[in-house]
Image (cartoon, rainbow, N blue to C red):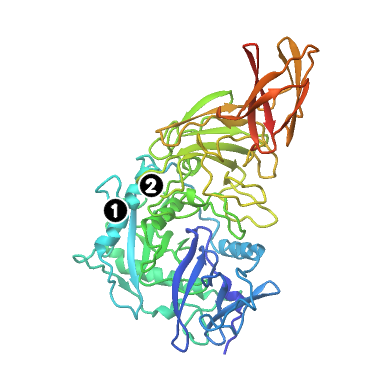
Amino acid sequence: MKKVISTLLLTVVLGFFLRAAYIEKLPVTLIQPNGDTLYCFATGDDYYQWLHDEKNYTIMLDVHTGYFVYANLIDGNLVPTQLVPGKDQPDSFLTPGLNISSEKMLALRKKMEDQVPKNISRNRGPNIGTMNNIVIFIRFSDDTDFSTLFTDVDQKFNDSSDVNAVSVYNYVKNVSYQQMYVLTHFYPAPVGNQIISFQDIYPRNYYLPYSETNLNGYQNNDTVNQRTEREHNLLVRAVESVQNLIPNTIDFDYDDDGNIDNISFIVKGEVGDWADLLWPHRWSLFSDSITVNDLRVWDYNFLLANTSYFNTSTMSHELLHTFGFPDLYRYGYNGTPVGQWDIMAGNATPPQQSNIYCKWKYGHWINEIPEITHAGFYTLYPNQGNKERSSYKIASSNPDEFFVLEFRRKLLPFDSGIPNSGVLIYRINSLYNGNAGTNLTDIFDEVYLYRYNGTTEEEGSLNTAAFYGNNSLLHQFNPWTNPSTFLTDGTVCYFELNQFTTRLADSITFYYNPDPISVNEYSVFNSEITIFPNPAESQLFVQFQNLDFEPVNYSIFDAVGKEVGHGIFSEPQSELNIEKLQSGIYLIQIVNHNQNKVYKFLKK
């Protein structure tokens, strides 16, 4: 019997164009060799997935016994133990979240990418027009017909009955500002409400990894990749079964690159187990030159019909990849640059918007992002529904990085799933395309969303990322606030945003100040005052130079004009305890004999 090293089963050998939504805690039902049912979860993306239980203890297949068991981490590799989920408790022996290193994950990613020929590329221009998407249903030789009603699937793709209908058609139309349309066609056509599917010559276990209890499964090693071979041959057979049914009167190549724009293969059943073929993904059919009406089959989506992720959100995510959008989650590193605020980082139901920067760079759906250079008030309109006046950018001290602002409002149809309404502030690093690929020694993101308590080292609270007036946590943004204006390397930029208006209006106005630290010495009542240190951390000193000093009243206001303190300066040099103030910009008003002067100080 051939020996299959368990660590090799971690490799999902996919391709350069393969991308998908990052899926967390997808319920999976497995059958052990003795007939016991194992309920667990799968987490991962196209490149790397793993099984785990409710408490995040890692589960893997022991290829020698065919049982799914808890995994331990030894010398950087996951190895099977004798602990069986559902029977044994791992708490006393193992640690939750055991997994291979980010460096090994990235090595697997590179191995996947290297399979696709580099002489074939998809250099798309503006995504304007109509894409005709093809759907082919697949079931295995041991499967019965699809029980899903055709109208349910068609509705997910094509429903345009109402502007709030949750469908791929409506989503792409909305996110592109009515510039891109996706029409989905099914081959063979349904019979009434019955899905007609291609039935393959092999059973389901042929597309699962090899083990002692699945001798029909595929094996991978350094020279033989049965997983890729079996998947691509399956899809070629499926395309051949419908070739003569696809008319040449429909334009399936809107970008005129000689390839079918997109095919969605919908496979009956659930996902498989650890890191196998039966996982939702997007890839390219690079190993065969099969054509339809003289157009090569290249880009495709591989979808599993009987799973919770088989929804409009996942389908829309995949199609944005077809339009050139990258993943915005980190791959191989624990951290969340954007999270639930963007469809390319996490999938909400209904699907949420893409950020305005990616709409500009990858979708080509807005013409420009105006740059703010002068102090003043600026107004933003919601990302959803506003092609113009929905974003601004601010330069940084690093020519490769800049800030982008957009207003996201929690509204139907495609932003009702975001955590809140308000202004989102992103850091953009123009050196990169997407966020996947970072590791512990080289952390970078093309798109990073500022959030409360977020730093270069701390995750912070992604639910708390919307700036708006009367927000006790996020109502100003400068080098001393939480979060601060930090770049990828931790350098802070010296500008200030404050005076945000309410989040519930149709627009949000804010004030931009390019110079928040111009505080030196000030003249008041024909005498000199020195405020120091400035910025201050816990104590602020106010020194009057006038020898005829008289006590004066003072009040302290935050950046939105709320009074946060008041009192009397009774000595020529007075000390203020500002330790309880949040970091940010404050104004101190000094009043005497019906005169008043206002000065600025910074709390670190």
Crowdedness of circle 1 by 10 Å Cα count: few (<14), some, many (20+)?
A: some
Task: Answer above or below: position of 255 versus 155.
Answer: above
Which residue appears at 60% of the width and 35% of the height? 477
Residue identified by numbered label 1: 158
- Helix, strand or loop for disc 1: helix
Q: Point out residue 419 in the picture as x, y percentages from the top left corner.
A: 46, 48
Label 2: few (<14), some (14–19) or many (≥20) C-alpha neighbours in 10 Å: many
Please state, as top left, top right, bottom left or bottom right, where the C terminus lies in the image: top right
Residue for point 59% across, 62% down: 109
Say which quarter of the image contains residue 198: bottom left
**476 over 17 or under it: above or below:** above
Which of the two residues, 7 or 258, is positioned nearer the viewer here? 7
Left or right side of 425 for 101: right
What residue lies at 61% left-to-right and 74% top-to-bottom? 222
Q: Can you give x and y, in whole percent of width and height, for residue 103 in the image?
A: 66, 63
Q: Is residue 182 visible?
A: no
Q: Secondary structure at mark 2?
A: loop
How many numbered discs, if any?
Answer: 2
